[in-house]
Image (cartoon, rainbow, N blue to C red):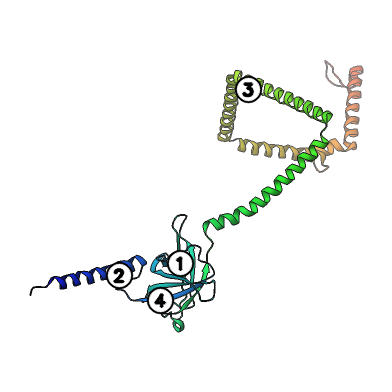
Amino acid sequence: MKLSKEIKAAIFVLTSILLFIFGFNYLKGTSLIDRQKTLYAVYDEVDGLLVGANVMINGLSIGNVTELEFLKNSTKILVTLKVKDELNFSSKSTASIYETGVLGGLAISIEPLFDRESIVQTGDTLRSSVRPGLTELINRQIEPLSRQLQSTITSVDSIFSGASSVLNKQTQLNIKESIEVLTSAINSINNSAYIIEGTLTEKNDKISKTIDNIESISENLSKVTKELNEFGLSNVLVDLKESTEGINSVIQNLNSDSSSLGKLINKDELYENLNSSILSLNNLIDDINENPKKYVHFSIFGRK
């Protein structure tokens, strides 16, 4: 079957119109294939939100902004949203305008609530909010800093004004002299530090040798202690202790009246008796020496 030119032209025009409609809706973010729900949100201001802006849940795109217009007899702005039909969040959810980045423009983020009794339907109006953008947050942070800086500058200016009136020429001269004295003291301290550093550098070898000698002495003492321990110093000390205890016991016996030596030492009677006996013996010896015949009888012819 051969088509006429008129039919071919009509088919071309219809095809072009369909492609135009499809492309226009695609650029607007509206799909002609997927089923979508139409939702609304009302804002006092939209901060430059544009048609075609993404509608997101947790960073995932679920639709687009399709229309922006003023409410009748009001300055509030009605925003029309197209979202996927299979989403079943609550109509009490919030649609927040937020800044996607410094150069990323604006988008709408839905903060979903899930309630089976109020599943969102086409024509429902969501709650609305506007999150502060990066610029606004920076301004909020800078504003108090600016106030503090202004206050600080005012305070510094007052201080300098007061200082100018208080610090006359004589005071300035005294401060200058004090600074010079302080500078001189710092220089002296630096010179002393250089001298100490030079001395330590020169005597470094001797200091090192002294430290080595101390370490050697410590090692020798450790060896001597070890040898004494191996020799049985503890046993020698135990024996010495036992000997000392024995000597103490002997001394206690000597001091006691129960022993013979103790009686001899401590009793005056024994001393006097012994002294008397020695005296008698001495007298007897003297008498024998003076009168030997008295005690010795000797005869050639025998005893009478």
List the residue tagged with mark 4.
Answer: 38
103 lies left or right of 194: left
Q: What's the amino acid at mark 4? A: Thr
Q: What's the amino acid at mark 2? A: Ile
Q: What's the amino acid at mark 3? A: Glu
| Secondary structure at numbered mark 3 | helix
Which quadrant would residue 139 be assigned to in this image?
A: bottom right
Residue 282 x/y as whole percent: 89, 24
277 lies left or right of 195: right
Q: Earlier in the sequence, mark 3 or mark 1?
A: 1
Mark 1 closeness class: few <14, some 14–19, many ≥20 residues within 10 Å: many
Placement of 209 over or under 142, stated as above or below: above
List the residue tagged with mark 2.
Answer: 21
The image quadrant where one finds the C terminus is top right
Q: Does the rendering let one see residue 253?
A: no
Q: What's the amino acid at mark 1? A: Ile
- CA distance separating discs 3 and 4: 85 Å
Mark 2 closeness class: few <14, some 14–19, many ≥20 residues within 10 Å: few
Q: Earlier in the sequence, mark 2 or mark 1?
A: 2
**Between marks 2 and 1 in the image, the one whose residue lies nearer the viewer:** 2
| Secondary structure at numbered mark 1 | strand
